[in-house]
Image (cartoon, rainbow, N blue to C red):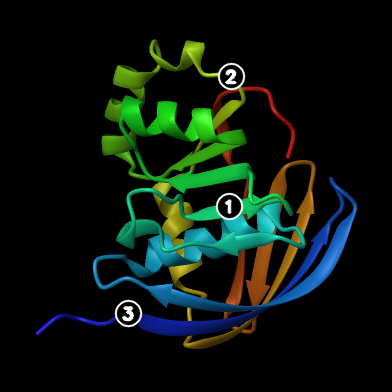
Amino acid sequence: MALKATIYKADLTISDMDRGYYDSHSLTIAQHPSETIERMMLRIAVFALHAGEYMAFTRGISDDDEPDLWHKNFSDEIEEWIELGEPDEKRLRKACGRAAKVWLYSYGGRAADIWWQGMEGKVGRFDHLNIFSIAPETLAELAALCERSMQLNATIQDGTLWLSSEKGSVSFTPQRLYGSGER
C-alpha cells in the first residue's frame, strides 16, 4: 500500500523590509511520505524569503522536472527556480537553463559540506545561480514550530528571517556559499 502525503495548512503573514513586500498567504503544504518535518518547514521558510504574488509550491520531491518552489510569469516562463538539498551538477545546469534566477538552499549538515566541496569548483559557469547553507540547528528549531494548522509570522530584514508562531520563534540568516543575486 502506497503512503499518502500529509497535508498541513499555514496562514503566513510576511513583512519583508528588504524587498518592501507585505502580504498574507494561506498555504496548503503536502508533506511527501519521504520528506522530513524539518525539510517541509524549511520549504515554508524559503517561501517567506522569496514570497510574491505568483510564488508557488510544486510537486517537488514527487517530480524530477520541478523544483520545490517556483515563480512563473504570465507566459509560463520560470522566473525563479528554488531548490532544497544537494542536487547534482546536471540538475543545476537544467535549472539554470530553464529559469532567470536559481536559488539553492543546502541543509544537510556534514553531508552538505561534503557536497559543497565537490561542487564549489563546478558552479562557476552557472549564471544567475545562488547557493545558501542552512545550519542543522535551524532545521530543528523550524520543526519545533510545526503543527497541522499553523499561524506563522515572518519578518525579514537585512537578510535575516524571523519566523514565529504561538509555539515559539526562529531567527536565522542563510549563509551565502555562491552567487551575488538579490532576492
Between the residue at mark 3 and the residue at mark 1, the CA separation in whole angstroms equals 20 Å
Q: Position of residue 155 (x, y in %)?
A: 77, 61
Left or right? Give the position of 135 relative to 153: left
Checking the image for residue 127, the label placed there is: 2
- Crowd tier of the residue under label 2, counting other residues whose Cα lies within 10 Å: few below 14, some 14–19, many 20 or above: some
**Residues under numbered marks 3 and 1 in contact, where contact means CB atoms less than 8 Å apart:** no
Q: Residue furthest bottom?
A: 149
Of the residues under marks 3 and 1, which one precedes in the sequence? 3
- Crowd tier of the residue under label 1, counting other residues whose Cα lies within 10 Å: few below 14, some 14–19, many 20 or above: many
Instruction: Say what secondary structure mark 2 lies in.
Output: loop
Residue drawn at x 49%, y 59% is 42
Residue drawn at x 78%, y 74% is 24
Checking the image for residue 9, the label placed there is: none
The residue nearer to you, when weighing 13 against 96, is: 96
The residue nearer to you, when weighing 77 against 159, is: 77
Kind of residue at disc 2: Asp
Residue drawn at x 73%, y 40% is 183
According to the picture, the residue beneath numbered tag 3 turns out to be: 5
Left or right? Give the position of 52 relative to 116: right
Instruction: Say what secondary structure mark 1 lies in.
Output: strand
Kind of residue at disc 3: Ala
Quarter-of-image position of residue 93:
top left
Foreground tag (3 vs 1) = 1
Kind of residue at disc 1: Trp
